[in-house]
Amino acid sequence: MDRSNKPSPITASGTGPQPSVRVENGRANARLPTGDSVDVLLYGATVVSWKSNGKENLWVSEAAKLDGSKPVRGGIPVVFPCFGPPPKDHATGKLPQHGFGRNSNWEYLGSSSSESGSLARGGDDSIKLDFGLSHAQLSEEAKKQWPYAFGLVYSVTLGKDGLQTMLNVTNQGKEMFEFQMLLHSYFRVDDVTRCSVNGLGSTTYIDKVLDAKEHQQSTPELRITGEVDRVYKSIKQDTTSIVQDGKSRLDVQRDRLVDSVVWNPWIEKAKGMGDFEPKDGYKNMVCVEVGAVDGWQKLEPGETFEGGQILKSHL
């Protein structure tokens, strides 16, 4: 896709070790001198690995397809322009569940040293990878299902202090469109039964497991003791934390977004998913997914929406 401010390749800003980027075989890899790294598939612009201090922060199913044949089970898939099965009476009604963002081939737009922003302290400290998707790149089927002119730029910034993923949506057409977006992050934990998700106290949520009705989080922390599928709406706190054995494991900071989904399939649902392996893998993952999924975001011609997350690992 065309982009006037396409970033320049990384250039050395000093005599010490520099960040590196490698793009090959449908995958972009960035690495810092510290050894921290991130891997992003061009298919779906899906982050499939984020390592800090030599340890993996994301959970990816052993049966996940990484060849572009189907959306990845795990990592950080990009959900756009609808979350879940779309309403049949909506403009997205003909699209598959979660839309086309996670199963389209994105273009690699380039890399740049990131000297500004939440994770940067200088050119050697962080590196940003940009990926693009537009109407022209969609399959013919998807073009018919959702015929709006749009442009997406997905920026993945690896820093010493964490990982930032931001989605920029532009209406490039002549008519308004509505959309939802979600970053479907699967986080790796040692044992989900020893974890809690904090920062959701007093928040209203829709419980998709219980009755799809609204409830209010009555405790400051959420314990995972069975299947969980909740949409938390208009969260007041900026940060949701995964706490493991009483210690902070990972912080998820919403950036210009106020909704989050918490999901774990537990025993029976994991058994029923063909691409979920090992079947007891639910013990080692929990999804905390930032997004705009409570209703629809309206975007007029020429307007832009941007939202994402900043992840900080405490490994």
Image (cartoon, rainbow, N blue to C red):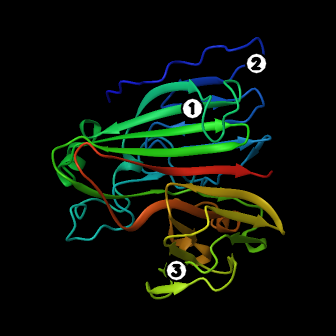
Judging depth in this view, the residue of 182 and 300 nearest the camera is 300
Cα–Cα gap, marks 1 and 3 = 34 Å
Amino acid type, residue under disc 2 in the picture: Pro
Quick check: marks 1 and 3 in contact, CB under 8 Å?
no
| Residue 92, horizontal then vertical, whole percent | 25, 61
| Residue 268, horizontal then vertical, whole percent | 57, 78
| Residue 115, horizontal then vertical, whole percent | 62, 28
Amino acid type, residue under disc 1 in the picture: Lys
- Label 2 packing within 10 angstroms: few (<14), some (14-19), many (20+): few
Figure check: 23 above or below 258: above
Residue sitting at x 44%, y 35%:
131
Q: Quadrant of residue 188?
A: bottom right
* Residue named by callout 3: 204
**Left or right for 48, reference 147:** right
* Residue named by callout 1: 128
Residue 197 visible in the snapshot: yes
Q: Which mark is residue 17?
A: 2
| Residue 232, horizontal then vertical, whole percent | 52, 73
